[in-house]
Image (cartoon, grey):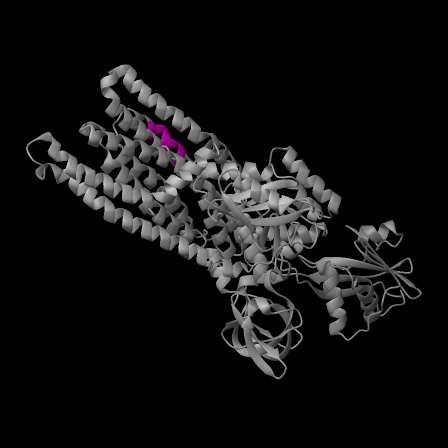
């Protein structure tokens, strides 16, 4: 979900949400605020991200949320995401829930004892029961007024006042009916109307369930917390002649930051002093530390394994590499899949339906059994209210997405939103770029072929080609420039420069007109290489033709190594029923050589950017669901044309806008990993939704016919919520399948 320049992203903390119905109502309320264009509400994070026009009033958004019975506050735009993982409000919420649980259990136990053994305490006459029943009522009153029942009753009253249904309303109605019925039964000496123990058990099970649920939900963000630990909270910054320990949030661009051994780098920057071995696996996937010295760039979140360096900060906080990764994961966790949107829509209307079903249950009992069945009718109605709380429905999808996106981030897979992760699991075709994707993207000049008699020497040909290519981002151009510099050739500044997508470079260097690119491109300029007489091209090599002043001058041949995991990735995808295609702008011989090495049978070579878009659309028109995999340097149009765009990225460009999925480490096995994780996540979501809907379909009728009493209904309701959360947590144990010859299974 990309934000147009005219829009702003506003993050809100939402207080009081308990289920999917709450999510739907907050979403609807925020969308009604003036200027709001899109909303994503996160039940687990108790937050919302709002996309709005530049003139949108944040106060109106807060008012809209409060009008539906919830509370909200605007979060700082540049907040510390690492600090969010240690939010004291989360700890305080867990402390309060633990307190509510302990008090609820402490008050419920004597109520249960009195309910089961009170008859042995009373006199022979019936009035003797009044005393111990009154004690039960007083204990339950304490529960209702305390932390176990008070927040639920307040939440239910607030929901009723704002005519919005949620879990609190259903539990509050059930407990209130049980309490009033029990008071009547106590004073009227009608024991069949007394449900003190049922109301106490309902409140206790809700308190226990919420405590366990909150702890379990906290584990869903364990991966983000692990990322946060890679962002140090403090750093040593040079102030004058001294090193001063400051908060990482206080570092500003230009500060000199000292990084001692075994410490994380706190900001993106450039080394100005010292040498160190830096573990960059989080950003590059490379397991071995790399040596960084003065002049080298380093990234926040990487670790100094050995040595000490002084770094001049260039990007800090959320703008630094680890901050961008955390923001990307946070965005994905707050987004929604289509399945989640459907569940939220159902949850929004579920509460009023349950209330109607509960009333119908009560009236149905009276219609069938007569007025003498008021007590069992009331018990069945209470059980129906309690058992049908839509908690599991609201948690089914977001818990799975939260765990999956966190696990994916730790393995080098960054999904821009939940829909992208969901879509990747449905693909049945992968279109691969070649250079920088199937190959390492670090080609080297292996041979230079002169025309003989053209007038330029080999060094001069390289110098002219490199001078023309020095501003091109293409890997082949960079290789030619690097080769020239290694040979100490002085490059000239182009007077004119034009890059022709899918063709080559046209430049003017002083009095010389230089064209560098494909042979066909030179042919269109009247300087085609000879059709015969050139040496055979090496297997897997590529050739760049050079023309000077309108005449063909020579060829530069380059070779690029195949990535070790390319063949394994294609094999794993094939085993999953996904066909691979190779789509490249390079010449056919090099493309076919690589395709043969990795096991791809369909190749489209010498393709221009427009050809690539057309090929992707052709596959989609044939009914294929396509992922386009590129190195992120070019082919943005082809990635946009695919169902899912996948880009290889490093820490420096990890949040590229071109792709829905960014893979850190530039290793093809991550594509197969991402597909496997997406499919595993989809399975968990389907299981959770099946359980959430199936539970209500099965349990509501059982409660309505009094097979399940209210106390058992409360236990079943909380068990259903815990089930979907714990099922989602199974994704934390997910591991990718291995393939023969594949690279390492993890990248971070």
Q: Tell me where residue 247 sits by quadrant.
A: bottom right
- The quadrant of the rendering that contains the N terminus is top right
In this view, which residue lies farthest toward the right?
Answer: 511
Question: Which is the main secondary structure of the residues drawn in magenta?
Answer: helix
Q: Quadrant of residue 309?
A: bottom right
Q: Is 748 within the magenta? A: no
Question: Which of the two residues, 415 or 481, is positioned nearer the viewer here?
Answer: 415
Whether residue 263 sits left or right of residue 217 in the image: it is right
Tell whether 108 sits left or right of 8: left
Q: Residue furthest left?
A: 124
**Front-most of residues 512 and 272:** 272
**Residue 730 place in picture, x, y as percent:** 39, 48
Residue found at the very far bottom of the displayed protein? 241
Q: Position of residue 670 (x, y in %)?
A: 54, 53
Residue 176 visible to an observer of this rendering: yes
- Kindly identify the residue that appears in the image at 26 percent across and 26 percent down: 706
Is 338 or 429 nearer to us in this picture? 338
Reply yes or no: does residue 699 show up in magenta.
yes
In this rendering, would 341 be left or right of 106? right
Q: Residue at x 16, y 42 (%)?
A: 113
For the record, the magenta segment spans: 692-700
């Amino acid at each position: 979900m990309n934000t147009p320049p005219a829009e702003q992203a506003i993050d809100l903390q939402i207080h009081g949400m308990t289920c999917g119905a709450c999510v739907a109502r907050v979403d609807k309320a925020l969308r009604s605020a003036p200027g709001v264009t899109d909303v994503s509400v996160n039940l687990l994070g108790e937050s919302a991200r709002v996309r709005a026009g530049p003139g949108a009033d944040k106060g109106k958004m807060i008012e809209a949320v409060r009008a539906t019975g919830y509370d909200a506050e605007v979060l700082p735009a540049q907040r510390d995401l690492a600090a969010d993982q240690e939010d004291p409000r989360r700890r305080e919420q867990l402390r309060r829930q633990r307190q509510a649980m302990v008090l609820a259990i402490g008050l419920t136990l004597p109520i249960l004892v009195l309910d089961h053994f009170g008859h042995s305490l009373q006199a022979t006459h019936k009035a003797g029961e009044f005393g111990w029943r009154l004690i039960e009522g007083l204990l339950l009153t304490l529960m209702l007024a305390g932390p176990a029942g008070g927040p639920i009753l307040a939440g239910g009253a607030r929901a009723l006042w704002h005519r919005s249904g949620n879990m609190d309303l259903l539990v509050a109605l059930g407990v209130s009916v049980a309490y009033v019925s029990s008071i009547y039964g106590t004073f009227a000496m009608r024991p069949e109307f007394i449900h003190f123990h049922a109301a106490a058990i309902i409140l206790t099970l809700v308190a226990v369930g919420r405590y366990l649920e909150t702890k379990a939900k906290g584990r869903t963000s364990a991966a983000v917390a692990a990322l946060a630990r890679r962002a140090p909270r403090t750093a040593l910054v040079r102030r004058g002649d001294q090193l001063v320990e400051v908060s990482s949030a206080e570092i500003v661009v230009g500060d000199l930051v000292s990084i001692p051994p075994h410490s994380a780098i706190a900001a993106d920057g450039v080394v100005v002093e010292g040498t160190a071995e830096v573990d960059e696996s989080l950003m590059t996937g490379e397991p071995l530390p790399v040596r960084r010295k003065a002049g080298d760039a380093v990234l926040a979140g990487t670790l100094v394994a050995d040595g000490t360096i002084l770094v001049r900060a260039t990007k800090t906080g959320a703008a630094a590499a680890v901050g961008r990764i955390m923001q990307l994961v946070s965005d994905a966790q707050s987004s929604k899949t289509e399945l989640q949107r459907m569940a939220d829509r159902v949850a929004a209307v579920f509460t009023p339906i349950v209330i109607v079903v509960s009333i119908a249950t009560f009236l149905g009992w009276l219609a069938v059994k007569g007025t003498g069945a008021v007590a069992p009718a009331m018990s069945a109605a209470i059980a129906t209210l309690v058992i049908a709380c839509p908690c599991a429905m609201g948690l089914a999808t977001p818990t799975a997405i939260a765990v999956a996106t966190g696990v994916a981030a730790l393995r080098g897979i960054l999904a821009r939103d939940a829909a992208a992760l969901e879509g990747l699991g449905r693909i049945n075709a992968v279109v691969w770029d070649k250079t920088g994707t199937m190959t390492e993207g670090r080609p080297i000049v292996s041979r230079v072929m002169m025309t003989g008699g053209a007038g330029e020497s080999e060094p001069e040909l390289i110098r002219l080609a490199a001078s023309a290519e020095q501003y091109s981002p293409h890997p082949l151009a960079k290789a030619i420039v690097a080769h020239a510099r290694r040979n100490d050739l002085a490059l000239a500044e182009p007077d004119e420069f034009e890059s022709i997508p899918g063709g080559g470079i046209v430049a003017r260097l002083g009095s010389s007109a230089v064209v560098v690119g494909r042979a066909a491109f030179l042919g269109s300029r009247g300087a085609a290489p000879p059709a015969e007489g050139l040496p055979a091209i090496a297997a897997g090599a590529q050739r760049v033709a050079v023309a000077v002043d309108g005449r063909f001058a020579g060829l530069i041949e380059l070779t690029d190594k195949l990535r070790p995991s390319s063949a394994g990735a294609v094999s794993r995808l094939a085993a999953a029923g996904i066909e691979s295609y190779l789509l490249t702008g390079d010449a056919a011989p090099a493309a076919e050589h690589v395709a043969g090495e990795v096991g791809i049978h369909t190749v489209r070579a010498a393709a221009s950017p427009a050809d690539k878009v057309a090929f992707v659309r052709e596959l989609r028109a044939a009914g294929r669901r396509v992922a386009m995999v590129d190195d992120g340097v070019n082919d943005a149009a082809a990635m946009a044309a695919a169902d899912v765009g996948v880009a290889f990225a490093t820490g420096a460009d990890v949040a590229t806008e071109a792709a829905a999925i960014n893979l850190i480490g530039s290793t093809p096995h991550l594509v197969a990993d991402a597909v496997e994780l997406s499919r595993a996540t989809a399975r968990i979501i389907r299981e959770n939704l099946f359980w959430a809907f199936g539970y209500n379909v099965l349990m509501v009728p059982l409660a309505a016919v009094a097979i399940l009493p209210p106390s058992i209904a409360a236990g079943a309701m909380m068990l259903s919520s815990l089930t979907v959360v714990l099922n989602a947590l199974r994704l934390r144990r997910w591991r990718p399948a291995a393939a023969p010859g594949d690279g390492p299974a993890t990248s971070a």
